[in-house]
Image (tube, rainbow, N blue to C red):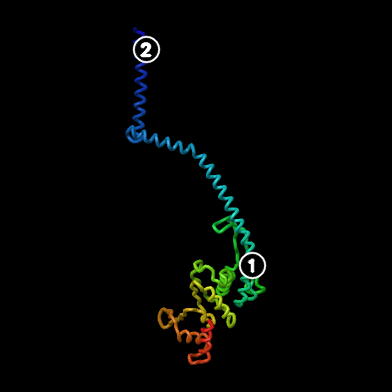
Amino acid sequence: EGGGAGITEAGGSGRLEEIEERLALLGRLERKHGGSIAAVLAHAERCRTRHEQLAGAEVALERARAELDQARAQVDRLAATLSAKRVAAAPELSAAVRERLGELAMPDAHFVVQVGPRPEGCGPSGSDAVELEFGANPGVAPGPLRALASGGELSRVMLAILSVAHGESGGDPQAAPLLVFDEVDAGIGGHTARAVGEHLRSLAHGRQILCITHLPQVAARAARHFTIVKDATTVPASTRVRALDGDQVVGELVRMLGAGDGDQAASQHARQLLQAA
């Protein structure tokens, strides 16, 4: 009996220590994770959920990598298709723009659309770098349009490109609802000025075009006319824009023709320009 009692006491002492250690552990967990058993259990559930997520992360990562590879392959295919179409269209576009430039008093202009690989690789607009190579006169080494063209030349090249792109129908006006041309008539006159005016009028179908011009042949093609007057009597000098209509338009065209207010021949010529438009 004495031996049995000793074993029981020893077993009871060990069990008590185990319980005390567990209670101490629970106490530490409570203090660390919210102060209650419920908070500890909630934290345990969050840990379990996170463990499951991490366990499936490798699978999700591999799936994402496969999808990325597929997307890259599709982008490469689409970019290659777009590049081939650009390369095929470049010579035709170059020739058409050169023809338009000839109509705009630049018969010897060099214009070539160069299509090459984009140094940075594929981007939002494809894998190509497109450069417009331009030379205004023979004997002058051509180079990038953005670096070599003057304001007037740039305006005429822009007009030629838009004329080719939109054709007789004017294209989609929403793609360019407003176009501004400045000095598009630089260095031209006569028949060429009329051609510029006709190109501008054709492009104006369904959109607005604002053109600053000194040529009556160009101005006569407009639907609305404004004159810009600089007043140097004020300090600082001021500039006024005045809308014209009726005889005011005729008078301004007469002035642009270099004639006086009483010049009947110039007045008749101005009216003919307006009627021809």
Q: Nearer the viewer, residue 17 or 95?
A: 95
**What residue sits 62% from the left and 75% below the top?**
102
Q: Position of residue 194 (x, y in %)?
A: 57, 80
- Do tag 1 and tag 2 residues touch (Cβ < 8 Å)? no
| Residue at mark 1 | 92
Q: Nearer the viewer, residue 114 or 177?
A: 177
Estimate how packed mark 2 is, as few (under 14), some (14 to 19) or many (20 or more) residues with alpha carbons within 10 Å: few
Give the structural element (helix, strand or loop) at label 1: helix
Quarter of the view holding residue 99: bottom right
Q: Position of residue 230 (x, y in %)?
A: 45, 81
Above-or-below relation of 88 to 197: above
**What residue sits 35% from the left and 13% below the top?**
8
Q: Looking at the image, can residue 241 be seen?
A: yes
Q: Which mark is residue 7?
A: 2
Q: Amino acid at mark 1?
A: Glu
Which badge, 1 or 2, is on the more N-terminal residue? 2
Q: Position of residue 114 (x, y in %)?
A: 63, 64
Q: Nearer the viewer, residue 185 or 179?
A: 179
Q: Amino acid at mark 2?
A: Ile
- Residue 31 lies left or right of residue 216; in this view the side is left
Quarter of the view holding residue 89: bottom right
For this orientation, the residue located farthest to the front is: 169
Quadrant (top left, top right, bottom left, bottom right) of the N terminus: top left
Above-or-below relation of 157 to 45: below
Q: CA distance from mark 1 to mark 2?
A: 105 Å
